Amino acid sequence: MKEDAALAAHAHTVKRYRGLMDWLTTVDHKKIGILYLIAGGLFFLVGGLEAILIRIQLIKPMNNFVGADTFNQLITMHGTTMIFLAAMPMLFALMNAVIPLQIGARDVAFPFLNSLGFWTFFAGGVLLNISWFAGDIPDAGWTSYVPLAGPTYAGGHGVDYYLMGLQIAGIGTLLGGINFMATIINMRAPGMSFMRMPMFTWAIFITSALIVFAFPVLTVGLVALTFDRLFQANFFETGNGGNTVLWEHVFWVFGHPEVYILILPAFGVISEVISAFSRKRLFGYSSMVFATVLIAFLGFMVWAHHMFTTGLGPVANGLFSIATMLIAVPTGVKIFNWLFTLWGGSISFTSASLFAIGFIPTFVMGGVTGVMLAVAPADFQYHDTYFVVAHFHYVIVGGLIFGIFSGLHYWWPKMFGRILNEKLGKATFWTFFIGFHLTFFIQHFLGLIGMPRRVWTYLPGQGFDTMNAVSTVGAFLMGIGTIIFIINVIVSAANKKPVANDPWEDGRSLEWSIPSPPPEYNFKQLPLVRSYDAWWNEKQKGNAEMPPAEPVGPIHMPSPSILPLIMSIGLFAAALGFMYHHTIIGIVGIVITFACMFTRSVFDDHGFHIEPEEQEKGVHA
Amino acid sequence: MSAHDHHLDGHLPHEPEKATLEGRNKILGFWLFLGAETVLFGTLFAAFIALRHQTLDGPTADHLFELPMVFAATMILLVSSLASVFAVQALHQHKVKPMIVWLIVTILLGLGFLGLEIYEFNTYVSEGHKFRTSAFSSSFYTLVGFHGAHVAFGVLWIGLLIAQIFKKGLTVVTAPKIYVSAIYWHFIDVVWVFIFTVVYLMGKVG
């Protein structure tokens, strides 16, 4: 930090942007977090709209609201959008907004890559969704099983959009995973040992490791299917010696860790929120850490439970069945730890806390049906029915989306400097919570009496009619809940009242020790961390701020850059070029991307410094 | 934290690649990236192993592979890895000239390896072992081709770094770049050892 004065002055020549260009070139983790939230939120609305259309189609038997083809496109795009373009980016939003603050860092390890990760995700998401306008829409399910997704049965470019979109978005996710692992390992403030890290940081650390080791598997699967479709390779073409079960293995070796990539961050959010609003130290912190690591480890060992009916044989099914049930043990540890944190706590029922408390029974229900599905012989009955649909919506919506809502209400003041309205927040919770259970609880029974998933309509008189109608009403209620949340966002944006550093007054971790929103350098002086729940303990000792670990001095910052955006546009163009066999465009796109990498390597980023006098002027972000 | 701290007084620390936080981040991040690359190649290997007997009417592995040439390619790549070790040793002794010489040796050997691989693929295609021939051929070209593309990228990358050393000299900014490119090169080498074993040797005996 101590810097030669002449050099510091020299480094000040970096161009700073304002307005739109600031957002397009930013490498500030807080702004990238907001970009992730906006983009992920938009895709969440698109995916939600698709869900509503699906439910309208299924509201009554023999409905013809949408055709069978459109229905297949809707379910494919709903699943793909929600998982890759809505849920994960919103998690990345929270990660970006919170992790550097929680570990007492000024930014992530690789701010440039952070920006590149956002723009590649966004380019991939846009590419996938322009399929709606191109008229060639992916329709082979979010799992894209072959031969259905192969060149023989899925002509046109629909599945190509899926492959290229996910490939490009996947680059962003992988970069994010590497970045957050490196950040958490290398950038922690003095005194912040691993076992003093907040639980959310731990969850993101483990999640990032899962991303790093799971996403390349998807990359290879997507490459293989792309080669089959565009260059007539034979990975999955059984007529030429290919193997369709290979796709199932590759997809689920990625796909199962992916569901833990989704849920572990939610576990982290819930741990933070429950501890803060119970005004108690998280019960069983070290067992919580251990359970998270164990869940992640076991998460790689259970992929074939998605394939019980594929015919792998009783030994494989038995082993994967037992491994799957084992995951219930560390998950149970977590559930009991949350309950014991609440136990005897002085609980305040804020919106964030309601979502966290609502999460617990909901997620337990999803977990119980998970163990039911893990029983391989029983799974033959449930397989491909609405029972499965109910199960994974209980863990993903009831788990992850509740977690995201909880985290958004909790960290909103830190992200935006505006507090969300509590009345509207509670209205969001109750409509969304009731709507959710109305939609999906009944689907367990629909599945048990035999309604298959992924069918675009059904005959009357099978006992499906009323339950489907109820389910659709619930879906609308969830839609209303989401709209109330959007209204809340607008209302809070219009409210100009500034927010205190620690607006809940019960903040426990470092992010609550600095202004809301934080200045662009986060910490004027890096804090000295003296315990777990560092900020809470300082408050208990009567301290108004964290003890500093360094003197005040000029702060070195990375320069903004437009290159990540251009690189992503290059990849976007390249994907379209190769898909439509305009090889020239494809090559131009790749050249643009490589030219950006070249530029980045050759021209060093010296960054700039923020001097102590400027720091006194206050908040920049 | 700042990159400027160490070359103001004109001499470098013993391990200039680890002298700054940026450098340490880069090295750690790169190891993590190689972890991801390991999974990527692991999956390609898994696909190849699953499909390697599906040759249909095309030539089999036993029929195609010429071990002497593949062995020569292996030796070339292993020696190139040794050259990059010497380059990093020169880096630690701050001897810029020998470092550049060893880096040039590294990429020349890399180019030799690529030449042999192109010649090899060309021969296979003329023998009727094309990308579209069978599941074996598709998975073979994808696995070995991914590795070849990594070698080609490495050659371009290290070439660019040599040019940067000429322009900027050895500093705490350029040193981590040389260091991670060397780790990358070793990684490519290790992958090739597995390809030599799983693809070529097992192709001859399995």
Image: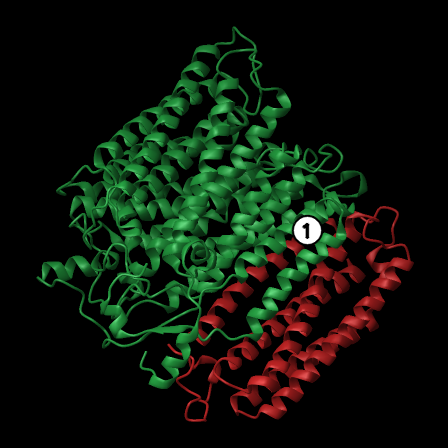
Chain colours: A green, B red
Residue B15 drawn above or below residue B133? below
| Chain of the residue under label 1 | B
Question: Which quarter of the rendered picture does the N terminus of chain A lie within?
Answer: bottom left
Residue A49's spot in the image, x, y percent? 48, 29
Image point (70%, 78%), residue name: B107
Say above or below: A106 vs A473: below
Residue found at x 23% / y 73%: A549
- Could you tell whether A86 is left or right of B184 in the image? left
Q: Can residue A124 be seen in this view?
A: yes
Q: Position of residue A613 (x, y in %)?
A: 25, 73
Q: Can residue B65 be seen in this view?
A: no
Q: Where residue A405 sits: x, y (%)?
A: 33, 39
Amino acid under disc 1: Ala
**Picture coordinates of residue B156, whole percent (x, y):** 68, 73
Name the residue tied to disc 1: B47
Pick the quarter of the image with the C terminus of chain A: bottom left
Q: Quadrant of residue A430?
A: top left
Q: Which residue is drawn at 68% across and 36% down?
A: A149
Residue B98's quadrant in the figure?
A: bottom right
Query: B35 or A408: which is nearer to us?
Result: A408
For residue A409, above or below residue A588: above
Instruction: Please state if A491 lies on the left or on the right of A454 as rendered.
Output: left
**Which residue lies most toward the left here?**
A542
Element carrying mark 1: helix
Query: On the picture, is A385 further left or further right than B61?
Result: left
Q: Would you say B56 lies left or right of A26 here?
A: right
Q: How many labels does the image show?
A: 1
Q: Residue at x 52, y 50 (%)?
A: A121
Q: Nearer the viewer, residue A132 or A100?
A: A132
